[in-house]
Amino acid sequence: MLKIDNLTAEIDGKTILNGLTLDINAGEIHAIMGPNGAGKSTLAYVLGGRPGYEVTGGSVSFQGKDLLDLEPHERAALGLFLGFQYPVEIPGVSNVQFLRESLNSQRKARGEDPLSGGEFLKLAKEKAALLRMDMEMLKRQVNVGFSGGEKKRAEMVQMGILDPKFAVLDETDSGLDIDALRIVGDGINSIMRKPDRAVLLITHYQRLLEYVKPDYVHVLANGRIVKTGGAGLAHQLESEGYETVVQEEAA
Amino acid sequence: MTELATLPTTREEDWRYSDGAYLAAADPAAIRQWRTLDVPAGDTHGESFTFLEDTSGTERLRVSVGAGGTFSCFAAIASGRYRRLELEVTLAEGAHFEFGGVTVGGGDAVQEFVTRVIHAEPHGTSNQVVRAVQWGKSTGNFLGRIEVVRDAQKTDAAQNFRALLLEKGAAANTKPELEIFADDVKCAHGAAIGALDDSAAFYMAARGLPPEVARRLLVQAFIGDAFAAMADDEAREAMLGHVLEKLGDAV
């Protein structure tokens, strides 16, 4: 589904990704862990196409298409979802309006009919319930006045509504209390744990992986993947720390 | 020499951001002309201005609002090389003035609102909200003067201006002027000039919104405040519609 080959990228002339290679097949959940500054968020932004993140080498193909050749909104229409570490507030625009316009823009790009207001609200209600979010919150302005945890939960409601093929979730677990973590974990499983979907979880901690069991865990350090393992690797990282594991690999 | 016989120049404070070339060629009698309006005590009167046709021009309206009366004015300047709307409103005891104005334009347009609100008696209230959306080399201006005479205690006056510059080269000017001779009053003013929020734009793109759709949503949210006090939903939608249509001209 997603094939990243020898990807290099820089911000303001500083190399952050340095030959990153990663294959993700449909039906798989991958987790990327790594110390601060390893390039985790950069990877998410490069995949999403954020301006300012310059790809200097390598390739990324998504569902057989050259992902890097597409505008950010085209990537979304193709089925890529980027869950933000810091979801952005949009004053004056309600979640309902934002998401309905987003979904219908994606549908239009794919040659599908737009959803009517009624159809959209039904869908939104269903997905909000899945994440135990009050429908009233969806009528409020996008992320304005939401707590950190509410923003992350709202991201997952967005994901449920937009129904992507592949999601990159950048530290979706940060800022969540234990109950919210479980709800978000269950949400990810029910929305994305399907044979034709895939997920890349970017996280610092092992705790989200208790709820969303990854098929593969990768360690990112200095802009490349230095170690890959199964779910057990996350436990090893948690107990031994990145430094030990990364050094072991270098030795 | 009477005021009527002379043309204003940009050396005059109230005309300092105007289009000098337009003023030089204008008809002095026409440009100095005031239309007058009396709102009787206890009455409510509304005016709205929508400048869409591609001609330059200035308009001056002098309003006297009787005790307990309300004068509301909503205006959209969306065309013309030079467009100016000037309001002078005198409020009697307990009278209210509500103003919402939007300028939207590109090219080398100069679009401005100039208001002078005179709180002549106690307990008057006024609220002015102006939004400017400019691109190209256009300019949006708001010169707002609030005068509170010595006896006009318990006056509550507010004025807020925000400008959104979609391109480098566009400009906005604002000059709040408060002349307060009473000692028990509330006068608030605020002004901010900025560009579209890049992080919001990327966030919206990542959800599948094409740039022009995202921009329309952001601008709609931005100007919404100016028309929020309009009681007539249909009129408000129509006015918003005109402004957003104009936005289609922006690159």
Image (spheres, rainbow, N blue to C red):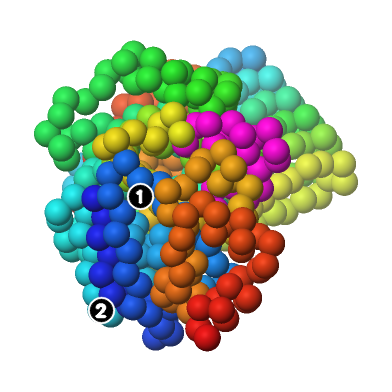
The answer to whether residue B66 of the structure is visible from this angle is yes
Of B61 and B242, nearer the camera is B242
Q: Which mark is residue A57?
A: 2
Q: CA distance from mark 2 to mark 1?
A: 23 Å
Foreground of the two, A57 or B73:
A57
Q: Position of residue B165 (x, y in %)?
A: 40, 60
- What is the total number of numbered labels drawn onto the structure image? 2
Q: Residue furthest left?
A: A111
- Looking at the image, residue B186 lies above or below residue B24: above
> What amino acid is found at the position of numbered circle 2 in the picture?
Gly
Q: Which amino acid, mark 1?
A: Ala
Query: Which residue corresponds to the image point at 52% horizontal and 86% vertical from the top-left?
Result: A251
Looking at the picture, how far across and down is residue A107, in whole percent? 21, 33
| Front position in the image: A246 or A111 | A246
Instruction: Kindly tell me whether residue A143 is visible in this rendering.
Output: no
Which is the main secondary structure of the residues drawn in magenta?
helix
**Drawn side of residue A67 relative to residue A14, left or right:** left
Which x, y percent locates residue A153?
56, 36
Please, what secondary structure does the residue beneath circle 1 have? Answer: helix
Is residue A239 or residue A115 the one in the foreground? Answer: A239
Residue A43: x and y in percent read: 40, 65
- Residue at 35% of width from left, 26% of height from top? B237
Q: Are marks 2 and 1 on the same chain?
A: no
> Horizontal placement of B66 versus B61: left or right?
right
Say whether residue A150 is left or right of residue A188: right
Crowd class of label 2 (few under 14; some 14 to 19; many from 20; radius 10 Å):
some
Identify the residue position indicated by label 1 in the image.
B206
Would residue A182 be counted in the magenta stretch?
A: yes
Q: Which residues are magenta?
A: A171-188
Q: Nearer the viewer, mark 2 or mark 1?
A: 2
As helix, strand or loop, the secondary structure at mark 2 comes to strand
Chain identity of mark 2? A
